[in-house]
Image (cartoon, rainbow, N blue to C red):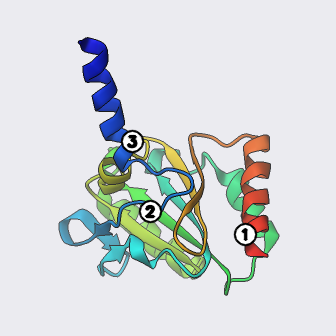
Protein backbone atom coordinates (compact mmCIF):
# COMPACT_ATOMS: atom_id res chain seq x y z
CA UNK A 1 0.00 0.00 0.00
CA UNK A 2 2.82 2.42 0.88
CA UNK A 3 4.46 1.76 -2.50
CA UNK A 4 1.24 2.57 -4.35
CA UNK A 5 0.78 5.85 -2.45
CA UNK A 6 4.41 6.78 -3.07
CA UNK A 7 4.12 5.97 -6.79
CA UNK A 8 0.97 8.09 -7.09
CA UNK A 9 2.68 10.97 -5.29
CA UNK A 10 5.78 10.77 -7.52
CA UNK A 11 3.71 10.53 -10.71
CA UNK A 12 1.69 13.57 -9.63
CA UNK A 13 4.92 15.54 -9.17
CA UNK A 14 6.20 14.61 -12.60
CA UNK A 15 3.03 15.92 -14.25
CA UNK A 16 4.14 19.41 -13.28
CA UNK A 17 7.87 18.89 -13.70
CA UNK A 18 9.86 20.39 -16.54
CA UNK A 19 10.38 17.43 -18.88
CA UNK A 20 12.70 17.28 -21.87
CA UNK A 21 10.69 17.25 -25.11
CA UNK A 22 7.65 18.94 -23.62
CA UNK A 23 6.38 22.50 -23.27
CA UNK A 24 5.94 23.14 -19.54
CA UNK A 25 2.61 24.34 -18.23
CA UNK A 26 2.11 28.08 -18.74
CA UNK A 27 3.05 30.09 -15.68
CA UNK A 28 2.80 33.78 -14.81
CA UNK A 29 4.76 35.60 -12.15
CA UNK A 30 3.07 38.85 -11.21
CA UNK A 31 2.04 41.23 -8.45
CA UNK A 32 2.75 39.79 -4.99
CA UNK A 33 4.63 36.86 -6.55
CA UNK A 34 7.10 39.13 -8.39
CA UNK A 35 7.58 39.71 -12.10
CA UNK A 36 9.95 41.71 -14.28
CA UNK A 37 12.29 44.22 -12.65
CA UNK A 38 9.93 47.03 -13.72
CA UNK A 39 7.00 45.32 -11.96
CA UNK A 40 5.25 44.00 -15.06
CA UNK A 41 4.04 40.41 -15.36
CA UNK A 42 6.35 37.69 -16.65
CA UNK A 43 4.64 34.83 -18.49
CA UNK A 44 6.32 31.64 -19.69
CA UNK A 45 4.38 31.82 -22.97
CA UNK A 46 6.97 34.38 -24.12
CA UNK A 47 9.52 31.56 -24.34
CA UNK A 48 9.28 31.00 -28.09
CA UNK A 49 10.71 32.07 -31.44
CA UNK A 50 14.29 31.83 -30.09
CA UNK A 51 16.44 29.41 -28.17
CA UNK A 52 16.13 30.43 -24.52
CA UNK A 53 18.34 29.57 -21.58
CA UNK A 54 16.52 30.06 -18.31
CA UNK A 55 18.48 30.36 -15.07
CA UNK A 56 16.32 29.85 -11.96
CA UNK A 57 18.57 30.70 -9.07
CA UNK A 58 18.63 31.01 -5.30
CA UNK A 59 20.58 34.26 -4.68
CA UNK A 60 22.87 32.31 -2.34
CA UNK A 61 23.79 30.13 -5.36
CA UNK A 62 24.25 33.00 -7.83
CA UNK A 63 27.85 32.07 -8.71
CA UNK A 64 27.30 28.31 -8.95
CA UNK A 65 27.09 28.22 -12.74
CA UNK A 66 29.30 31.16 -13.66
CA UNK A 67 31.44 28.89 -15.88
CA UNK A 68 28.33 28.10 -17.95
CA UNK A 69 27.36 31.79 -18.11
CA UNK A 70 30.87 32.65 -19.27
CA UNK A 71 30.78 29.87 -21.88
CA UNK A 72 27.49 31.26 -23.22
CA UNK A 73 28.93 34.77 -23.33
CA UNK A 74 32.01 33.52 -25.20
CA UNK A 75 29.79 31.95 -27.87
CA UNK A 76 28.42 35.40 -28.81
CA UNK A 77 25.16 33.93 -30.02
CA UNK A 78 23.03 36.02 -32.37
CA UNK A 79 20.48 37.78 -30.14
CA UNK A 80 17.90 37.49 -32.91
CA UNK A 81 17.99 33.71 -32.37
CA UNK A 82 19.08 33.36 -28.73
CA UNK A 83 17.95 34.86 -25.42
CA UNK A 84 18.49 34.35 -21.70
CA UNK A 85 16.21 34.71 -18.71
CA UNK A 86 17.38 34.97 -15.10
CA UNK A 87 14.64 34.28 -12.58
CA UNK A 88 15.70 34.92 -9.01
CA UNK A 89 14.08 32.77 -6.31
CA UNK A 90 13.84 35.50 -3.66
CA UNK A 91 12.05 33.22 -1.19
CA UNK A 92 15.10 30.93 -1.04
CA UNK A 93 17.36 33.35 0.82
CA UNK A 94 17.58 35.29 4.05
CA UNK A 95 18.91 38.30 2.12
CA UNK A 96 16.43 41.20 2.06
CA UNK A 97 14.46 41.57 -1.17
CA UNK A 98 15.24 45.30 -1.49
CA UNK A 99 18.98 44.57 -1.60
CA UNK A 100 18.59 41.84 -4.23
CA UNK A 101 16.22 44.00 -6.27
CA UNK A 102 18.74 46.86 -6.30
CA UNK A 103 21.41 44.45 -7.56
CA UNK A 104 19.04 43.14 -10.24
CA UNK A 105 18.36 46.67 -11.52
CA UNK A 106 22.12 47.19 -11.93
CA UNK A 107 22.48 43.83 -13.67
CA UNK A 108 19.61 44.65 -16.04
CA UNK A 109 21.47 47.79 -17.13
CA UNK A 110 24.76 45.90 -17.42
CA UNK A 111 23.20 42.99 -19.36
CA UNK A 112 20.25 44.51 -21.26
CA UNK A 113 19.80 41.37 -23.41
CA UNK A 114 18.98 39.22 -20.38
CA UNK A 115 15.44 39.22 -19.03
CA UNK A 116 15.49 39.49 -15.22
CA UNK A 117 12.51 38.27 -13.20
CA UNK A 118 11.81 38.16 -9.45
CA UNK A 119 10.04 35.11 -7.99
CA UNK A 120 9.05 36.07 -4.45
CA UNK A 121 6.97 32.96 -3.67
CA UNK A 122 8.76 30.02 -5.33
CA UNK A 123 6.28 29.95 -8.22
CA UNK A 124 8.55 27.85 -10.45
CA UNK A 125 9.42 25.51 -7.58
CA UNK A 126 5.72 24.85 -7.11
CA UNK A 127 4.54 24.92 -10.73
CA UNK A 128 7.48 23.40 -12.61
CA UNK A 129 9.11 21.44 -9.77
CA UNK A 130 12.41 23.24 -10.21
CA UNK A 131 14.80 22.56 -7.37
CA UNK A 132 14.56 24.99 -4.47
CA UNK A 133 17.69 26.53 -2.89
CA UNK A 134 19.69 25.71 -6.01
CA UNK A 135 20.80 26.84 -9.43
CA UNK A 136 18.60 25.45 -12.22
CA UNK A 137 19.32 25.65 -15.95
CA UNK A 138 16.58 24.99 -18.52
CA UNK A 139 17.14 25.29 -22.29
CA UNK A 140 14.10 25.77 -24.52
CA UNK A 141 13.72 25.41 -28.29
CA UNK A 142 11.91 27.90 -30.56
CA UNK A 143 8.57 26.26 -29.80
CA UNK A 144 9.01 26.45 -26.02
CA UNK A 145 9.86 22.76 -25.61
CA UNK A 146 12.48 21.83 -23.05
CA UNK A 147 15.72 20.67 -24.67
CA UNK A 148 17.81 20.38 -21.52
CA UNK A 149 17.30 20.72 -17.77
CA UNK A 150 19.78 20.54 -14.92
CA UNK A 151 19.76 21.44 -11.22
CA UNK A 152 22.97 22.11 -9.31
CA UNK A 153 26.49 22.83 -10.51
CA UNK A 154 27.19 21.96 -14.13
CA UNK A 155 30.50 20.20 -14.57
CA UNK A 156 32.62 20.52 -17.70
CA UNK A 157 30.83 17.66 -19.47
CA UNK A 158 27.37 19.07 -18.70
CA UNK A 159 28.45 22.50 -19.96
CA UNK A 160 29.66 20.94 -23.21
CA UNK A 161 26.44 18.94 -23.52
CA UNK A 162 24.25 22.03 -23.01
CA UNK A 163 26.28 24.07 -25.52
CA UNK A 164 26.07 21.32 -28.13
CA UNK A 165 22.29 21.19 -27.69
CA UNK A 166 22.05 24.97 -28.09
CA UNK A 167 24.37 24.96 -31.13
CA UNK A 168 22.42 22.16 -32.79
CA UNK A 169 19.12 24.01 -32.42
CA UNK A 170 20.40 27.39 -33.55
CA UNK A 171 21.16 26.04 -37.04
Q: Where is residue 23 in the image (x, y as percent from the top left)?
A: 47, 63
Quadrant the C terminus occupies? bottom right
Mark 1 lies on residue: 169
- Residue 93 falls left or right of residue 136: left
Q: Which of marks 2 and 1 is nearer the N terminus?
A: 2
Q: Is mark 1 on a helix, strand or loop?
A: helix
Q: What element carries label 2?
A: strand
Near mark 1 (Cα within 10 A), the count class, few <14, some 14-19 or many ≥20, is some
Distance of label 3 from label 2 (alpha carbons):
21 Å
Determine which of the numbered discs, if any, sits on residue 14 in the image: 3
Residue nearest the viewer, comparing 42 with 13: 13
At a point 30% along the width and 22% down the height, the residue shown is: 6
Q: Where is residue 116 in the image (x, y as percent from the top left)?
A: 46, 71
Contact between marks 1 and 3 (CB within 8 A): the answer is no
Residue nearest the viewer, comparing 16 with 62: 16
- Residue 50 falls left or right of residue 107: right
Judge whether residue 113 can be spotted in this image: yes
Q: Is mark 3 on a helix, strand or loop?
A: helix
Tell us which disc is closer to us: 2 or 1: 1
Distance of label 1 from label 3 (alpha carbons):
25 Å
Q: Position of residue 8 (x, y in %)?
A: 29, 29
Determine which of the numbered discs, if any, sits on residue 73 in the image: none
Distance of label 2 from label 1 (alpha carbons):
23 Å
Q: Which of marks 1 and 3 is nearer the N terminus?
A: 3
Determine which of the numbered discs, if any, sits on residue 87 in the image: 2
At a point 73% along the width and 40% down the height, the residue shown is: 155
- Residue 158 falls left or right of residue 152: right
Amino acid sequence: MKKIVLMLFVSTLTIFAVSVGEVPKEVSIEKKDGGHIDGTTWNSSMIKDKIYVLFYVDPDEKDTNNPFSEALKAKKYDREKFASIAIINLAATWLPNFAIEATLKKKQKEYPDTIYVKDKNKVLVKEWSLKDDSSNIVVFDKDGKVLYSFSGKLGEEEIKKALIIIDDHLL
